[in-house]
Amino acid sequence: MNLHLKLAEQSQLHPDKEAVVFKNRRITYKQLNAMIDKLANGLRQLGIGPGDRVILALGNCPEFIISYYAIIKVRGIVVPVNPHYTINEYSTIMLDALPAAVITNHQLVPLFERLSPEIKPACGIIATGDENGGSRAHSYEKILRSASDTFVPDKAGGRHDVIVIMYTSGASGSPKGAMLTHHNLYRNALTFAQCCKITSADRSLMIAPAHHAAGQTCVMNTSLLVGATLVVHEGWKGPKPLLEAIQSEKITFYFGPPTMYALLVKYPDIDKYDLGSWRLAFTGAAPTPPEVFNAFEEKFGLKLYEGYGLTETSPVATVMPLEGVYKAGSIGLPIPGVEVKIVDYEDREVPVNQIGEIVIRGHNVMKGYYNRPEETGWIMRNGWFHTGDLGYKDNDGYFYIVDRKKDLIIRGGLNIHPREIEEVLYSHPMIFDAAVIGIPDPIMGEEVMAFVHSREGSQVTPEEIQEFCADKLARYKIPRFIRFVENLPKTTSGKLLRGELRKMI
């Protein structure tokens, strides 16, 4: 069994049940499966087939879901990317993935048409919301209207076939594509559903980004595989729309990063809403401050459950159990079929309550990094995926994260690598040197701060630097805080001392 076969099964079991709700659209399981089959036929007619990578640059919408499952159905590989990326960010990923096609919205078509010829997709661009053909892109809507809703597969894919490549920042700052298989994603979604007791009776609210691993597995795939109803919002618009959706749509399950909960508990009008349907609140993607757990339970009468994982682990590796001992601040216990342990620098397991690196083994671990066998071998050494996160296990087997070995910044649940931003800053003609760190923020978890050493005789303002970054970095990566310094702390060999930078805040 795999993702698209399980969804097709749900369309047989619950044909008239709401599968996806988006604004004023209510799509049943039968309708959803038919649209997936139509698009799959259309993709096949365009020449997309087994092993072809397809960039999926869409926000939260039914078209993302349909495209995701249709690509998998033709045995292609989904490459989900943030629709707010700049042309530089898209170019980097496309140069590595060399996709056969791009599926995006019509507003982004001009950006993709500006890409250099060597990375332009051979099968073209498919654009949503452009039925009148305002560009040379294929119309998504026209494909759905003209294609057959009966899909005949050429051959079933194997459980270890790669179906999604998720790009994530690495230690060098350049994105690496984590290859996730049928087995990785199907089993991770169903195991998460089992841990959280999510069934066809549930109604899930999807505000977390669909292009993000957690949004895909913990909300989209989990809900559709068990026959639940998925209520989709375009993104976070503040606490009010979330509370209105829980009330009007009778939401039972909501997943969001700690930032969303930090904002939610500060909202003053919570008592105005009937939230009686809400039974499970889940968070992950970044560390959750202890005060958020306490404030949430006090205001909503629900415990906030936390989990842990990475893009490379599909992403779920641990979950706070719904039954048994609840420990606020812990990332919980390993999910069934997954092993987690804490090791020292020689990969020897350390005693309980001793800090070391978190390593993971199980059905959720990726097949490897696309086009990067050496990095795959290193991060998967001795048969365990090395997370780069530091943590410990207590006497009851519960895990805790205490720090990151990586320099990664996690802002609002989104990963940002300082090196990527630094390389953009280095290209500014008035900047001699630059360094970027994450600084604590009560709402976003971390904010981006840049230390800038200007060239002699040059004058540049923080606003000018931010404007310079605007067409080179997604908005959430642009430094919010910029401090000018006369020099940056480095070792005698020239290595940046980020720890010293944090002392300068």
Image (cartoon, rainbow, N blue to C red):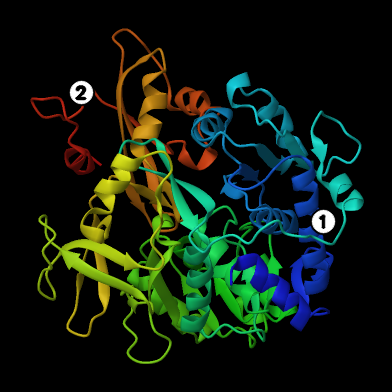
Q: Rounded to the nearest whole Å, what is the CA distance between mark 2 and mark 1?
A: 59 Å
**Residue 193 visible (yes or no):** yes
- Residue tagged by mark 2? 487
Nearest to viewer (mark 2 / mark 1): 1
**What amino acid type is highlighted by mark number 2?**
Asn
- Tell me if mark 1 has few (under 14), some (14-19) or many (20+) residues whose alpha carbon lies within 10 angstroms of its own: many
- Residue tagged by mark 1? 38
**What amino acid type is highlighted by mark number 1?**
Lys
Q: Secondary structure at mark 1?
A: helix
Q: Is residue 426 left or right of residue 258?
A: left
Front residue of 165 and 230:
165
Q: Quadrant of residue 36?
A: bottom right
The percent coordinates of residue 212 (x first, y second) are 53, 55
Judge whether 366 appears above or below 100 on screen: below
Which residue is located at x 47 percent, y 36 percent? 478
Judge whether 426 appears above or below 215 on screen: above
The percent coordinates of residue 73 (x first, y second) are 68, 58
The percent coordinates of residue 117 (x first, y second) are 63, 20
